[in-house]
Amino acid sequence: MITKRLKNVKLETGRRLNQGRTMTTTACYTIDLADQLITGIYPEEQAPNFNGTTIDIKGRLALPPFKEMHNHLDKTYMTVGWRAALPVGSFPERLAAEASELPLLAPSTERRASAMIESLMKRGINHIRSHVNIDPYIGLENLEGVQKALQKYDKYITYEIVAFPQHGLLREGVPQLMREALRSGATMVGGLDPGGIDKAVERSLDEIMSLATLFDADVDIHLHDRGHLGTYTYSKWLDVVADNHYQGRTAISHGFSLGDVSLTEQDELIARLKEQEVAIMSTIPFGQSHQIPPIDRLRQAGVNVHLGCDGFYDSWSSYVSSDLLEKLTTFCELTGKITEDQLADSLSLITDRPLLTKGELTWPLVGDKADFIFIDAAASAEVIARKPVDRLIMFNGHLLH
């Protein structure tokens, strides 16, 4: 039974050439909802009679919600007042600066994470993959706070929690803490620079996979190491994935080193990433285009690539942005995407699928969840180029206010 109707919803229907310029075609539709799902999609003039609750979307463009695939809910300073990040000279110094404040921040994790979740939701994000510190300084305290925060919003969002050994996986006691975290609600296994931090690539990767197979958990590894140390780690991880038949269940976050080597070496690793179904997560670091892996080449080869905001306003960065659309726009600017096709085709980096595939509508479809972002725009290409902030959000058939 239909419980709610949306009228005057603009959907993308295709693309056409107009005097050499690609244009997006759109039309207005009526969308019926029931039990948090889409039950009908009709051209505006063909919708059947309905006397129940009807919401006029007023011709706004509908987009799917965004997926935040790399975040650190436990690190933010939100709600504790302004403090700029400390100046440091190296990655280990940054870790030391974070370690000094972890015990002070841990008691406020639930409150801080909640503020961050609300900020993400207001911008259209309905799925969050959050890495959460598991370390000797705070044990599982941040995990407990993040879990409580996420559970408050599970009417609207889905989430994954990565047990993240921010200060090293091979430190004494950390593997045991990781096991406790995975027994206590963490859903994925994380890792950090098996070479640069753990100083033992093979042993670190083997420990990660041991935890993953023990708990039947997926994996997402931070890999900042540059050059051949980084690509060596890529290669060894691909060996581990193949040996353990873990295709389709792992990801590498950041992975800068893939852009440091020759195109021939890139091609070899990209082919293996595709074969082992290893995804790449990028946060498009602001002002650091040299730290972006070759995303276009990865996508062209069929490797899954997703974006995330990373942490924001924390000991690692003074900037605040929970807008995944901003990350996508920055990526398009850095890589010179200016045409309708180029902009629109990048949208799937922050959603679960494209709006159109070979000119055919692939979102929304009957049976999809009733999750939408409604924006006053001509097409998704304009949204990406202009980053409109006025967004009407609906998750599970409920409008956010």
Image (cartoon, rainbow, N blue to C red):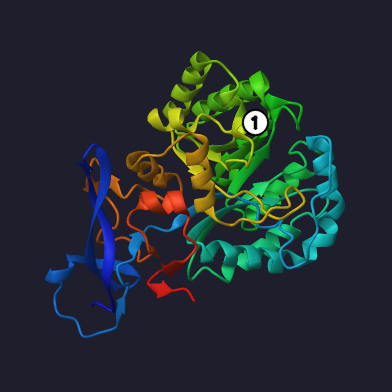
Type of amino acid under label 1 = Leu
- Secondary element at tag 1: helix
Number of marks drawn: 1
Nearer to us in this view, 218 or 266: 266
Quadrant (top left/top right/bottom left/bottom right) for the N terminus? bottom left
| Residue at figure coordinates x 57%, y 22% from the top left | 235
| Residue at figure coordinates x 66%, y 51% from the top left | 311
Residue 306 position within the rendered picture, expressed as x and y whole percent measured from the top left:
49, 43
Residue 352 position within the rendered picture, expressed as x and y whole percent measured from the top left:
40, 50
The residue tagged 1 is: 205
Nearer to us in this view, 154 or 83: 83
The outermost residue toward the front is: 19
Quarter of the rendering containing residue 195: top right
> With respect to residue 304, does 360 lie above or below?
below
Nearer to us in this view, 270 or 241: 270
* Crowd tier of the residue under label 1, counting other residues whose Cα lies within 10 Å: few below 14, some 14–19, many 20 or above: many
> With respect to residue 392, does 254 lie above or below?
above
| Residue at figure coordinates x 29%, y 68% from the top left | 59
Q: Is residue 70 visible?
A: yes
Residue 350 position within the rendered picture, expressed as x and y whole percent measured from the top left:
46, 49
| Residue at figure coordinates x 53%, y 58% from the top left | 159
Question: Seen in the image, is 60 located left or right of residue 203?
Answer: left
Question: Seen in the image, is 6 located left or right of residue 401?
Answer: left
Residue 96 position within the rendered picture, expressed as x and y whole percent measured from the top left:
85, 43
Question: Seen in the image, is 363 located left or right of residue 50?
Answer: right
The outermost residue toward the right is: 100
Q: Is residue 68 visible?
A: no
Question: Seen in the image, is 256 located left or right of residue 19?
Answer: right
Quarter of the rendering containing residue 54: bottom left
Nearer to us in this view, 114 or 316: 316
